[in-house]
Image (cartoon, rainbow, N blue to C red):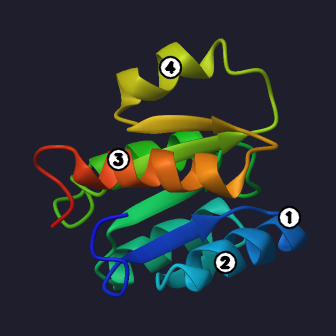
Amino acid sequence: MASPGLAHVLVADDDPAFRELLSAWLEADGVRVTTARDGEEACELAEAGALDAVLLDLLLPRRDGYAVLLHLRARPATRDVPVLLVSGEPPAEHATIGPALGADGFLAKPFTRVELRAALGAAMARPGGPR
């Protein structure tokens, strides 16, 4: 991951155990983590602070992951923040819809810590982002 001690990642997932697991993995790598339990909270937190990436579950209450992604891409402050979509559903449709809406990658649950590191590192290293 780029600049591990400086990275700030938003983890948005409605499963508390999964949020805790991802937070523990990221924090062990020196990443600052903010968590959201639903889509509305994810939007609010994304606008409130400078983020280096977002891990975004697709099945969130109050606003699903696609709606959150569209919200993030529509705002200047979050337009260029890398977003990785996360879902337990088969990736077939997400592989086309997510990138069309501006997602930087997709992780199918369950995934390993190594897969998370690789996907997040690739998304954060892409040209033009993060800030």
For the residue labelled by badge 2, is the local secondary structure a helix, a strand or a loop?
helix
- Circle nearer the N terminus (3, 4): 4
- Circle nearer the N terminus (1, 3): 1
Mark 2 to mark 3 CA distance (whole Å): 18 Å
For the residue labelled by badge 4, is the local secondary structure a helix, a strand or a loop?
helix
121 vs 18: above or below: above
The residue under label 3 is 123
Is residue 78 toward the left or the right of residue 92 in the image? left
Nearer the observer, 12 or 125: 125
Which amino acid, mark 4? Ile
Q: Position of residue 90 (x, y in %)?
A: 77, 21
Query: Which residue: 35% across, 75% down?
Result: 47
Nearer the observer, 67 or 25: 25
Mark 1 to mark 3 CA distance (whole Å): 23 Å
Which amino acid, mark 1? Asp
Is residue 39 toward the left or the right of residue 97 in the image? right
- Circle nearer the N terminus (1, 2): 1
Furthest-front residue in view? 114
Q: Count neighbours of disc 1 (C-alpha within 10 A) and say few if under 14, some if 14 to 19, many if 20 or more.
A: few
Query: Which residue: 21% across, 53% down?
Result: 80
Mark 1 to mark 4 CA distance (whole Å): 23 Å
Mark 3 to mark 4 CA distance (whole Å): 17 Å
- Looking at the rendered image, the disc whose residue lies closer to the viewer, 4 or 2, is 2
The residue under label 4 is 97
Nearer the observer, 47 or 1: 1
Mark 4 to mark 2 CA distance (whole Å): 26 Å
Q: Count neighbours of disc 2 (C-alpha within 10 A) and say few if under 14, some if 14 to 19, many if 20 or more.
A: many
Label drawn at residue 23: 2
The residue under label 1 is 15
For the residue labelled by badge 3, is the local secondary structure a helix, a strand or a loop?
helix
- Circle nearer the N terminus (4, 2): 2
Dots 1, 4 in contact, CB < 8 A = no
